[in-house]
Amino acid sequence: MPKVFSLLLLLSALIRAEERPNILFCIADDWGWPHASAYQNDTVIHTPAFDRIAREGALFHHAYVPSPSCTPCRNSIMTGQWHWRLGEGANLFGSLPQEVETYSHLLERAGYHVGSWRKSYGPGVLTGKFSENHPAGKVYGGGLSHFLDSRKDDAPFCFWLGASDPHRGYIPGLWKELGMKPEDIQIFRHFPDNQIVREDVADYYFEVQRFDDDVAKALALLKSRGELDNTIIVITGDHGMPFPRCKSNLYDSGTRVPLAIRWGKKIKPGQVFHNFTSLIDLAPTFLDAAGLQIPRVMDGISLLPAMTTWGESRLRPFILTGKERHVPSQESPDWGGYPSRSYRDHDYLYIRNYTPNRWPNGSGQWQKTSFPGTWYGDTDNSPTKSDIIRNKDRSHAYRRFYQLNFGKRIAEELYDLKADPDQLVNLATTLPDMTKKYRQMLEHYLTQEKDPRHTGDDFDFDTLPYRGGGPKHRDYKRP
């Protein structure tokens, strides 16, 4: 009997191995919600590849990044952990702690063929084991085709398809080639409504569509090789668009991203989810689909039960997000960031700003900042940014735009999402009881999730090195 039992276990394992899905993870750089045509936000942008995945699988309306900054978000995706638990990895241009594991490494050890293309980890500096074994898998300069050609013995694969789109800089006016009409774009209400801004957003839309074209080519390649239906395909972005009050901010315009997932016949097509998910949930989802145990250290939860059986009830009823240092652009000698955390459900968004004396997107006194040459450094330079700042004293409307995008903020923010979905009117001082309720919920869950800012741990994110930027990309440390 023992021998028969062992043979049955081996046969079962072989069957599971044959059924293990491939994984194609497609992520755009600086692509925020709702800028995909599946969300029907306007008639200008067209993302047929994303729309197809949403139509043939699941579309998530409330997907959020753990942090609206490249390095911490990508570190969290790879590790399935909140960025505040990753030490230096919580900051832009940080590194990845040696003690953590990534889902790619776990899958590789389980027999997966693992690789990546273009932007995956970073920006930052890979050290130790990660300098020898890339956290997203070996980089294949020839893309998905090169990666698939190098696979041996038909092993299941896991591929990270990255992009630099729609990160700045842009070539102005390329949107004209696609016949876009900037006057039809639905812009955020914290932007001035003028031609400068509309054409800037159109340039962003052009690059979103170029990323979507890359995904479409990958789907066609998988279909031609007979791999499409046994591949989990995920498409998303790493945070909001590179515009004021978006990227590096905890409003929906900075933390909310498109997300669509397809897996052949394994998940029912046409599913639409409105409860919350974090991108830290992707690593456990991939491991779960591969039949691997999800490490207890991972904070994310698998999305498979929601997509295959239980529906909305297995998603999150609320979401946490946070930010540490993006760019060290406070006034000298302050090398800090703008640490903040948020708790959001369907009713309210609550934001806690820990250093309201600092500038939320860096100081405009570029000649006085700690980091050479920065100018509101947490916001990428752009025509929209320049328009708001240059005209900030032109009118009451522009003064308001400047305050919303670059002005100092009070310690607490509270937004009524039903009355104010754009999150422009802070009610923290006018609704003190509600503010207290949400403050307590945020503090409770951040303590539960081992955030050093709420566990009493002696940890200072601001003292960590900034391993990039500057004229020669030297490592910078606070003096």
Image (cartoon, rainbow, N blue to C red):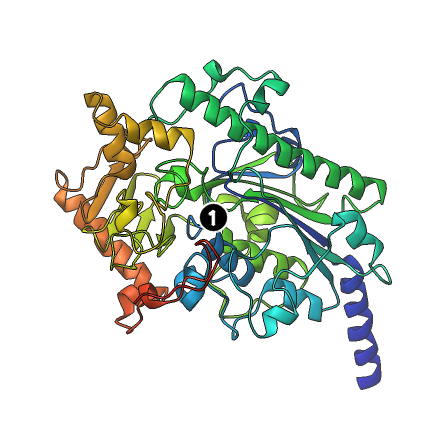
* Image coordinates for residue 125, horizontal then vertical, percent: 53, 64
Residue in the image at 42% along x and 33% along y: 382
| Quadrant of image for the C terminus | bottom left
* Image coordinates for residue 355, horizontal then vertical, percent: 22, 54
Q: Is residue 171 above or below residue 152?
A: above
Q: Is residue 170 visible?
A: yes
* Image coordinates for residue 420, horizontal then vertical, percent: 28, 30
Residue in the image at 39% along x and 37% along y: 253
Q: Is residue 1 visible?
A: no
In the rendered image, which residue does mark 1 sit on? 277
Q: Which of 387/82 is in front?
A: 387
Could you tell me which secondary element the residue under label 1 belongs to? strand
The answer to which quarter of the image holds residue 292 is bottom right
| Left or right: 386, with 57 as reference point | left
Residue in the image at 43% along x and 54% along y: 470
Q: Which of 273/233 is in front?
A: 233
Q: Is residue 238 above or below residue 184?
A: below
Q: Which of 131/412 is in front?
A: 131
Which residue in the rendered view is the most extreme toward the bottom? 2
How many numbered discs, if any?
A: 1
| Quadrant of image for the N terminus | bottom right
Characterize the local packing of mark 1: few (<14), some (14-19) or many (20 or more) Cα atoms within 10 angstroms: many
Residue in the image at 32% along x and 65% along y: 478
| Left or right: 256, with 425 as reference point | right
The answer to which quarter of the image holds residue 107 is bottom right
* Image coordinates for residue 321, horizontal then vertical, percent: 37, 51
The type of residue carrying mark 1 is Thr
| Left or right: 214, with 278 as reference point | right
Q: Is residue 213 above or below residue 284?
A: above
